Image (cartoon, rainbow, N blue to C red):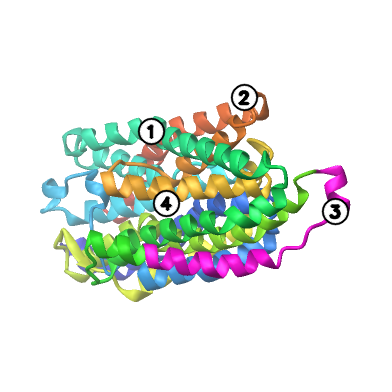
Amino acid sequence: MEIIAQYGPWFIGLALVFGLFMTWGVGANDLANAMGTSVGAKALTVKQAIVIAAVFEFAGAVLAGGSVTSTVRSGIINPAGLAENPEFLVYGMLASLLAAGFWLMMASYKGWPVSTTHSIVGALVGFGMVGIGSESVNWGQVGSIVASWVVSPLIGGILAFTLMHSVRALILNQEDPFQAARKWGPYYIFFVGFVISLVTIKKGLTHLDIEISSTNSFLLSIGLGILTALAGGILLRRAKRDLEAEKDQRFSSVEKVFAPMMIFTACAMAFAHGSNDVANGIGPLAAVVSIVGSGGEILQKSGLPLWVLLVGGVGIVAGLATMGYRVMKTIGTRITELTPTRGFCAELAAASTVVLASGTGLPVSTTHILVGAVMGVGMARGIGALDMGMIRKIVMSWVITLPIAGVLSAIFFFVLRFIFG
């Protein structure tokens, strides 16, 4: 308690700096995944993606990023043994933010799309083992995360593969693909509006004190989906056929129909990401603020100040703007060649998988889902359409995320303990 009282302002300052660093990594890596499909499909330029993300990600983080958060994220560690030494939990949360931030910086520099959730989880496990003891780690939860390395991309990939084949059957294989795209486009847009609304209502609004039943969420999402389809239908009717371009590429006019649809999914995915995943970056920051504010008492739940959400929003947008292009390039061009139709199917599959996961409680990663979805649309053209060398590098980066973040966190924990202890 003495150390908390003596160095409280220092702990808050370090938590702010490390929290900005961690959320910068979230933007450079995690948000870049959500934007990568749109950029790779040439529906958006990198600059346009950054502007859209800056607006919608920040709005999602601040408006629906959370009012209450658990001081010990995701049930990974049990801090019961630290009641007499709450400063150890402060060291651990600071070490976790710094470790996850360093790993995300390295992964983003390499262009590896890793999971920010798994980065912070690995960091918490590393701190828990050296700061409290291995018995404090919820190994069942860690096992579920390891299992999600297979489950997440598999579900996203299967759904993207199925959607790509539906586009092929209903649109690309028709006698007049352009007219077929204008006919079936509103139905796909309805599905986009329905799925993204359901993601936002079920996962985003739960952070606000707004209770909406599952039935009402479903009905409200259907209504929003219909409105989206009507607006999209008007937009699609404005799409002009390019007969000259069709001489070289039969589906060039079809791709022009799907490009505006991808802009919508990019906006919606950015907002959903901000409302859902900002807690990965600011959870430990909120924990430090809570412990210092309570004079050393470890609370299981605490209020989440607005300024903490603002830190998360600023850090995420800064990360995307400064280094996000590297991961966007990997997702958009290095796994398989994307067009607006393929990118649309990948984004829609990823969003749908998030809805399925949130309803069943599967511990999935948005990053892994998106990579799996991009692989799924590539597989629809045959395994030769995939860059297996790049996929091996990505999978390896997933596997080493937990141990590297854990080791870094353990090192930083001891450094902080030495400095302040």
Visible residue check, residue 148: yes
Mark 1 falls on what kind of element? Answer: helix
For marks 1 and 3, the one nearer the N-term is 1
Residue tagged 2: 383
Q: Separation of disc 3 and disc 4 at Cα?
A: 55 Å
Rendered location of residue 288, percent (x, y): 28, 62
The first of marks 2 and 1 along the sequence is 1
Q: CA distance from mark 2 to mark 1?
A: 20 Å
Looking at the rendered structure, the kind of residue marked 2 is Ile
Q: Is residue 206 above or below residue 416?
A: below
Estimate the x, y position of residue 360 in percent, counting from the top left.
27, 44
Q: Is residue 11 visible?
A: no
Quarter of image, res 172: top right
Which of discs 4 and 2 lies nearer the camera? The answer is: 2
Q: CA distance from mark 3 to mark 2?
A: 32 Å
Q: Residues within 10 Å of mark 3 (few under 14, many from 20)?
A: few
**Circles 4 and 2: CB distance less than 8 Å?**
no
Label 3: which residue? 243
Marks 1 & 4, CB-CB < 8 Å contact? no
Is residue 110 a member of the stretch shown in magenta? Answer: no
Q: Quarter-wise, where is residue 217 in the image?
A: bottom left
Tell me residue 380's x, y (percent): 59, 32
Secondary structure at numbered mark 3? helix
What residue would you read off at disc 4?
A: 98
